Image: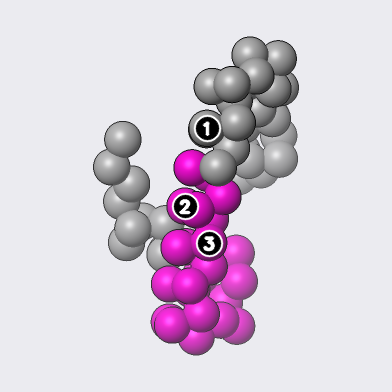
Amino acid sequence: SVLNYQALNNEILKCCPDLTADEAVDAGKSLVALLKILQEAAQENPELNGELNVFMEGDFINEDK
């Protein structure tokens, strides 16, 4: 899946308004790298995949609702 880097950048700046534009870009790159690592780990471990899905759907990610 192709991530919308601008949307990701905007979300990071919303959460962390004190970051500079460059810091927000770096944070986005780090998040994408972490996501790829987690996706690879989840493919090798179905139990982890289930836990990640629960976490992603949980209140932690969707605090704005």
Pick whichever, 14 or 47, lies toward us.
47
Most frequent secondary structure within the magenta stretch: helix
Q: Secondary structure at mark 2?
A: helix
Q: Which residue is mark 2?
A: 32
x%, y% of residue 1? 31, 35
- The segment highlighted magenta reads 13-36
x%, y% of residue 64? 60, 45
* Residue type for callout 1: Glu
The relative height of residue 5 versus residue 63 in the rendered view (above or below) is below
Mark before the other along the chain sequence, 1 or 2 = 2
Q: Which residue is mark 1?
A: 40
Comparing labels 1 and 2, the label whose residue is closer to the camera: 1
In the rendering, which numbered label is found on residue 24? none
Is residue 38 visible in the rendered structure shown here? yes
| Horizontal arrangement in the rendering, residue 5 relative to residue 32 (left or right) | left
Residue in the image at 43% along x and 82% along y: 21
* Picture quadrant of residue 59: top right
Find out whether the residues at labels 3 and 1 contact each other: C-beta distance under 8 Å: no
Pick whichever, 4 or 29, lies toward us.
29
Q: How would you rate the neighbour count of disc 2 (Cα within 10 Å): few for under 14, some for 14-19, many for 20 or more?
A: some
In the rendering, which numbered label is found on residue 30? 3
Color theme of the render: one colour
Mark before the other along the chain sequence, 3 or 1 = 3
x%, y% of residue 43? 54, 22
Residue 26 magenta-highlighted = yes
C-alpha separation, residue under disc 3 versus residue under disc 1: 15 Å
* Residue type for callout 2: Val
Q: How would you rate the neighbour count of disc 1 (Cα within 10 Å): few for under 14, some for 14-19, many for 20 or more?
A: few
